[in-house]
Image: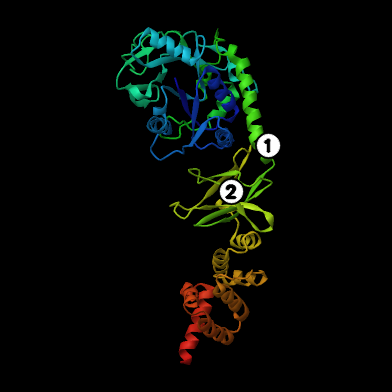
Amino acid sequence: MKLAICAICKNEKPYLLEWVAFQQTIGFDRIFIYDNVSEDGTSEMLAALDRAGHIERIHWPRRPDVAPQRDAYAHFIQTRAQDFDWVLICDIDEFLVPQSGTVVDFINRATAANPNTSAIAIPWLMFGSSGHKRFSEDLVIERFTKCEPSPSPSVKTLFRPKHAYNMRTHICDLIDGEYVDNTFAIAEWSKRRPIDLADPKRGHALIHHYFTKSRDEWVRRRTMGRADRVEDQKRDVATFDRYHRQEAQDISALIRAPEVRGRISSLKTSLAEHFSDIQDGGIAILLVNGSWIIGRTVNVPQGTPIRLVINETEERRTTNDKRLAGGHLGFCINVRWLGQPIEKIRASIVGGSTAFMLTKEQFPTRSETLANVIKYMPSAEQIIFDLAIKIGSDKARFRSLRKVSFPKFPKFPEYGDFLQGVLRYETDPASFTAFLSEYKTTHREAGEDVLSKFGNPTNYIGALVSAATRRTQHAL
């Protein structure tokens, strides 16, 4: 029997290792997590866990007018779920807690009671703050044991994907078989809200829903959007008080804490073994334009995965396998067909603990970019030339090119000769006119292609070329 669990999350870094360890403890074979574009280090940790083989992470940005949770679940059903006998779809603050044993034991008991079982509705047990005001490093299942005295009518569903065609957040739509509850009786649904159980019981398993956590954690969650809503709605802080003074207690998850802690330790050891040599590493962005994002890595071995998120939606992955000048390593990402201007870049080393964000205002200037490319990519003749002529389109900035030590242009000598000529003869119109005549004779079609770039006389270099052309025509 193959089991999988799927969740979508956003900004849940403090809780990830515990949640993954708990799912491993109760017997899920594969863990799929949809990353709804996190900014607190969640994305970096998920990428590391994925790279180390503990989970599969799927980049899942918010799309206009689409609830990311339902969208992610539909994607999971269509692309991953069919490889498994049973799957559970839930959130990072939800823990399936069998009364005893593992998930496999729970399923075996259900199918023994009713061999036609295709889905099991498992009610929530709602946990509040247990009186805690602040976050602590202890496990969620250790900190929060106070709960509602009875289960909630709301459920999550453990189901056979080959027997279902749709998932609606809490319940699935079956093709065949029977929907039972956590007592293994045929599920009876509320007439008022037919996705809720009519009479929820403790049964053989519950979904522990750690809804509020401490007061500070709840306030922090107010800044987070909700993955189950189309709009980026925030949490109401007044809701916290409803679950702040619970008196009932449930320790059925707590008793699993020693094994969960052991698995967390194993996960940390695995991550350290995989990524110990990159913890002091860094990334420097050298160039951002409409075609490329080029960067350099620092203190990172060759072949290390690099992750970039562009405009908080588009994810690109590559490795630092480009050999830059001076023995440096870097990466190049083609963004020519991105279809949108680049306003923001979030860059991280997969396995690293941090990421850094650059907004458009923080991108290297053209002059900084030119210096970067000449230093680290001196053979990138096309990029160097394009940058130089863009800088030279402005008269004031054109003069700054005189201070640049351009490399040779063995592949495109017409580029090097043109830059040398325009910089030398800018203030000497007659000499520049003579230079262009000789330039056209020397470089023929390639030279004409270069000069065709300067048809706009409002561009400073274009104005120089246009004036020289007019002088030549007048002389004829």
Q: Position of residue 159 (x, y in %)?
A: 39, 20
Q: Position of residue 319 (x, y in %)?
A: 57, 47
Q: Position of residue 427 (x, y in %)?
A: 61, 81
Disc 1: CA contacts within 10 A as few (<14), some (14-19) or many (>=20):
few
| 158 vs 283: above or below | above
Residue 272 lies left or right of residue 331; in this view the side is right
Q: Quadrant of residue 393?
A: bottom right
Disc 2: CA contacts within 10 A as few (<14), some (14-19) or many (>=20):
some
**Circle 1: residue type:** Ser
**Mark closer to the chain start, 1 or 2:** 1
* Residue at 60% in and 43% down: 348
- Can see residue 235? no
Tell me whether the residue at label 1 lies in contact with that at label 2, contact meaning CB atoms closer than 8 angstroms: no
What sort of colour scheme is used for the picture?
rainbow
Local SS, label 2: strand
Q: Position of residue 90 (x, y in %)?
A: 46, 24
Q: Cα distance, mark 1 to mark 2?
A: 26 Å
On residue 276, the disc is 1
| 252 vs 304: above or below | above
* Residue at 41% in and 8% down: 183
**Could you say which is closer to the camera, residue 245 or residue 77?**
77
Residue 115 lies left or right of residue 271; in this view the side is left
Local SS, label 1: helix
Quarter of the picture holding the N terminus: top left
Residue at the spot of label 2: 358
Residue 304 lies left or right of residue 210; in this view the side is right
**Circle 2: residue type:** Leu
**Viewer-nearest of discs 1 and 2:** 1
| 41 vs 212: above or below | below
